[in-house]
Amino acid sequence: MTPVEFVVASVRARIDNLTPVQLAAELGDPFLLLVDVREPDETQYGTIPGAVLVPRAMLEFHADHGTPHHVEGFERGRRVIVYCSAGSRSALAVRSLQELGYRDVAHLDGGINAWIAEGRPMTGPTPSPTLCCSHRHHT
């Protein structure tokens, strides 16, 4: 296990890891903030319906009310679910949000790859697992 894999595994052991079934059950909640932390080139093939696109590199700045980059909708008392391609970046994102004071935070374990594998609905173009989800450098 590489050092970063160790860190991600350690974080996953301490956070709320949702399955696609569990996420789908929460999507109707009007107080849910669903956050896609993938990079723009990854989202061109589609997203989970209702997701707000916030690249991982900007998450803390968009979630913090004290920055000029704050995005409306990020509220510490709100349920926030984060996802990425495979679940590593979103796990780390949950840890960061918790450090910023967010308490009701979870991530989609397996990321959008797991969502697509179960045939769940997407917005945008029909995803192809070989196009949107097999990025060499994204996890």
Image (cartoon, helix red, strand yellow):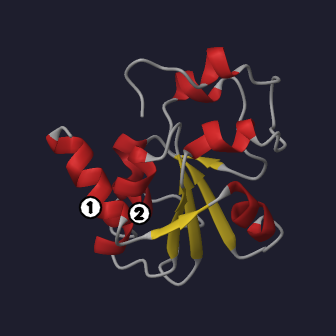
| Circle 1: residue type | Ser
Q: Nearer the viewer, residue 79 or 71?
A: 79
Nearest to N terminus: mark 1 or mark 2: 1
At 77% from the left and 43% from the top, the residue drawn is: 118
Q: Is residue 83 left or right of residue 66?
A: right
Which quadrant would the N terminus be assigned to in this image? Answer: top left
Q: CA distance from mark 1 to mark 2?
A: 12 Å
Considering only vertical position in the picture, is 107 above or below 66?
above
Q: Is residue 73 left or right of residue 90?
A: right
Label 2: which residue? 94
Considering only vertical position in the picture, is 87 above or below 129?
below
Q: Is residue 27 left or right of residue 33?
A: right
Farthest front residue in view: 1
Considering only vertical position in the picture, is 14 above or below 77?
above
Label 1 secondary element: helix
Q: Position of residue 10 (x, y in %)?
A: 26, 61
Considering only vertical position in the picture, is 48 above or below 128?
below
The reply to whether residue 66 is visible in this rendering is yes
At 79% from the left and 48% from the top, the residue drawn is: 49
Quarter location, residue 131:
top right
Label 1: which residue? 10
| Circle 2: residue type | Val
Q: Position of residue 68 (x, y in %)?
A: 37, 56
Q: Position of residue 88 (x, y in %)?
A: 40, 46
Q: Nearer the viewer, residue 64 or 19?
A: 19
Q: Nearer the viewer, mark 1 or mark 2?
A: 1
Label 2 secondary element: helix
At 50% from the left and 37% from the top, the residue drawn is: 38
Whether the residues at callouts 1 and 2 have beta carbons within 8 Å, the answer is no
